[in-house]
Image: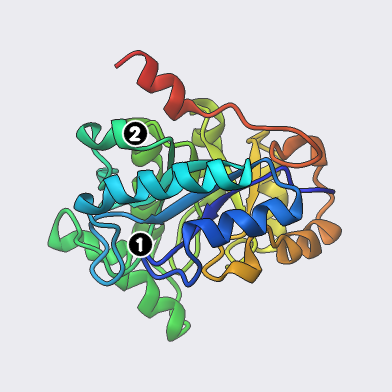
Amino acid sequence: MKLTADFHTHTPYSHGKGTVLENAVRAQQLGLVSLGITDHGFSHKLFPLKRKEAPALIRDCAEAKEQTGINVLVGIESNIRGISGLCDLTEKDFENFDLYLAGIHIIVRYEHFSDRKIGWGSWARRKFHIKPSESLVRQTTRAYINAVEKNPIDILTHVGYQCFADPVEVAKCCRDRGTYFELNSKKEHLSDEELAAVAATGVRFVIDSDAHTVDRVGDTLRVEEQLSRVGIPFSQIDNIDGRYPTFRFAEYKKHM
C-alpha cells in the first residue's frame, strides 16, 4: 500500500510545527502527488487559523507548490460547532479554500451553551470512564450527520475521537452524500469492530496522517496496523496506490 496524497496536515497557522513549505518538501520526498494544509477552523479557542491570515496561507501554498511540484491544497479542518451541524467555514470563506475537512473538537466556540455536551461532556466521560447516555450518543451522531448534510464537507475527520457517536450511522450519511470517512493515523478513534462495521456500509475512505510535525507527514503506520487486523478491501480507500479522491467541495463551488 502506497499513499498517493495526505490531505490532513497542520502548520504554525494553528499548532503544527512545520511550515507549509517544510510539509510540502516532506511530501515530495515521500513521492506524494498532493498535500492538504488543513489547520484548525476559526472557532477553535486556542489554535485557530484566523480569517485575516487566509491570504498569507494561500500565498504560502502557492509558493510551496511552485518549489516542490506537489499539489498543495489550501484547506481547513473546520469545527462542528453544535448538534445543528453548524461549521465555522461559511460560504463567504469558500473562495479561499480548496479542501474542506471537518470534525468535532473540544475547545471551540459552540453554537449554543448546551452544545458543549458533544465536546467537553464527552471528553469528561471518556477521561473518567463514564458510560455515555443514549441521548448523548444520539445527539453527537446527529451533529456529525447534520454537518455532512448541510455542508459540502470533503472529509470527516477522526470520527468518535474524544466523543461518543454511532460511527455506522455517520458512515451511511457520508456514503450517501459523497463525504469521505477518514482513517486517522494519529488518533485512535475506531475500534477494530467499529471499523469493520463502518466498512460494511460501503463508505469510501481516505487515510490521513493528521501530522503536526514534519516527520509525520505521510505517516500511515497506525492505520496500516489496524488494517492488518481488519480485512477491509484496499479498493475502498481512495488515496492509495495511485488513486485520487473526487471531492464534493470543488464540485459544489462550480455551482455557487
Q: Which of marks 2 and 1 is nearer the N terminus?
A: 1
In the orientation shown, which residue stands out farthest toward the bottom?
Answer: 128
87 or 220: nearer the eye? 220
Mark 1: few/some/many CA within 10 Å (<14, 14-19, 20+):
many
In this view, 42 is above or below 98:
below
Disc 2 from disc 1: Cα separation:
23 Å
Taking the spot 57% from the left edge, 31% from the top edge, the residue there is 175
Taking the spot 55% from the left edge, 71% from the top edge, the residue there is 213
Image location of residue 149, percent across then percent down: 37, 31
The residue at which mark 1 appears reads as 13
Residue type at mark 2 is Asn
- Residue 70, picture quadrant: top right
On-image quarter of the C terminus: top left
Taking the spot 63% from the left edge, 31% from the top edge, the residue there is 245
- Residue 232, picture quadrant: top right
Taking the spot 65% from the left edge, 59% from the top edge, the residue there is 26
How many marks can you see? 2
Instruction: Report the colour scheme.
Output: rainbow
Can I make out residue 99 in this image?
Answer: yes
In the orientation shown, which residue stands out farthest toward the left?
Answer: 113
Image location of residue 135, percent across then percent down: 34, 58
Image location of residue 224, percent across then percent down: 79, 59
In this view, 98 is above or below 54:
above
Residue 223: image tag: none
Mark 2: few/some/many CA within 10 Å (<14, 14-19, 20+):
many
In the orientation shown, which residue stands out farthest toward the front?
Answer: 67
From the viewer's perspective, is 131 left or right of 40?
A: right
Can I make out residue 158 in this image?
Answer: no
What secondary structure is marked by label 2?
loop
The residue at which mark 2 appears reads as 151
